[in-house]
Image (cartoon, grey):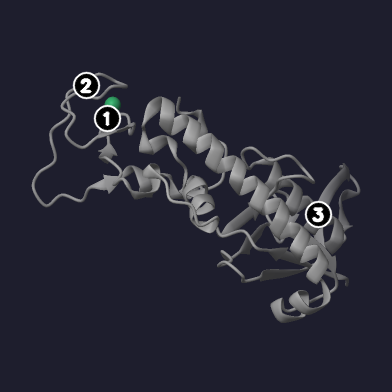
């Protein structure tokens, strides 16, 4: 059994799924500024079908290969990434390490990851600024863009403005303004919410898509 450590300084929780691989789900908690999170992984396995008499064969995936793949897919699914230049703060080291040991032994790699993540954050803020200037829609600004601006110590109008209250259309589940009487998507009548009814805000609805491409698709 070999081990590897995925190191994260990404200020969001990370969940990666590898269908067909055991274990399947890999989670890393959000890293606060200056903090390091680690996920120590073992070798994993997958089954490869050969034929009807021999059935499936177990294939081992080395921890280092799996770890590299997890990092690659998270990065690939994040917006505005340029691999090796500006990217989420994630890297892999062989063997098992605690956050304290990572800071001690891999200070250079950590510094490089911080720099690349910082460039990624700058880019995310630029994109948010452009979008805000053009559309002034808080729903277009994703949680990772807000975190990016906060992380860089920037103040922005789109950070301080309260998101417009919104809710799901009861018919088609499109997100519509709370006060809307007609759904913009399915054009059905929707009842205004009753007093005291829970109101979701644009900011909370998208938290599940943090850092991913989807929130940017709503142009
Ligand atoms: Zn609708």
Ligand 1 under 8 Å from disc 1 Cβ: yes
Labels 3 and 1: the sequence-earlier one: 3
Report the Cα–Cα distance between label 3 and label 1. Answer: 42 Å
Residue drawn where x is 61% and y is 39% of the image: 79
Q: Is residue 205 visible?
A: no
Pointer 2 residue: 188
In the rendering, at what x and y percent does residue 172 appear?
32, 29
In the rendering, at what x and y percent does residue 206 appear?
42, 44
Labels 3 and 2: the sequence-earlier one: 3
Q: Residue 151, which numbered label? A: none
Residue drawn where x is 88% and y is 55% of the image: 59
- Tag 2 and tag 1, C-beta contact below 8 Å: yes
Quadrant in which the N terminus is drawn: bottom right
Ligand 1 under 8 Å from disc 2 Cβ: yes
* 21 left or right of 63 in image: left
Labels 2 and 1: the sequence-earlier one: 1
Pointer 3 residue: 68
Report the Cα–Cα distance between label 3 and label 2. Answer: 47 Å
Along the line of sight, the residue nearer the viewer: 22 or 181: 181
Along the line of sight, the residue nearer the viewer: 24 or 130: 130
Q: Tell me: residue 99, above or below residue 14.
A: below
Report the Cα–Cα distance between label 2 and label 1. Answer: 8 Å
- Tag 3 and tag 2, C-beta contact below 8 Å: no
* 101 left or right of 141 in image: right
Pointer 1 residue: 171
Residue drawn where x is 81% and y is 63% of the image: 109
Q: Which of marks 3 and 1 is in front?
A: 3
């Amino acid at each position: 059994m070999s081990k590897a450590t995925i190191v994260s300084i990404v200020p969001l929780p990370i969940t990666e799924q590898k269908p067909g691989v055991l274990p399947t789900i890999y989670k890393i908690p959000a890293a606060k500024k200056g903090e390091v999170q680690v996920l120590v992984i073992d070798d994993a396995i997958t089954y490869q079908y050969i034929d009807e008499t021999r059935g499936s064969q177990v294939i081992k995936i080395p921890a280092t290969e799996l770890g590299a793949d997890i990092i690659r897919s998270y990065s690939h699914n994040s917006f505005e990434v340029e691999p090796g230049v500006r990217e989420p703060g994630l890297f892999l080291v062989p063997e098992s390490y605690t956050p304290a040991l990572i800071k001690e032994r891999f200070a250079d790699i950590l510094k490089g990851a911080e720099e690349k993540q910082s460039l990624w954050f700058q880019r995310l803020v630029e994109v948010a600024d452009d979008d805000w200037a053009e559309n002034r829609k808080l729903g277009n600004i994703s949680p990772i863009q807000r975190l990016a601006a906060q992380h860089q110590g920037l103040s922005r109008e789109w950070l301080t403005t309260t998101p417009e209250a919104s809710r799901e259309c009861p018919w088609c589940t499109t997100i519509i303004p709370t006060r809307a009487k007609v759904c913009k998507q399915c054009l059905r009548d929707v009842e205004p919410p009753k007093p005291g009814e829970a109101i979701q805000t644009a900011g909370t609805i998208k938290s599940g898509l943090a850092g991913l491409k989807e929130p940017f698709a709503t142009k």
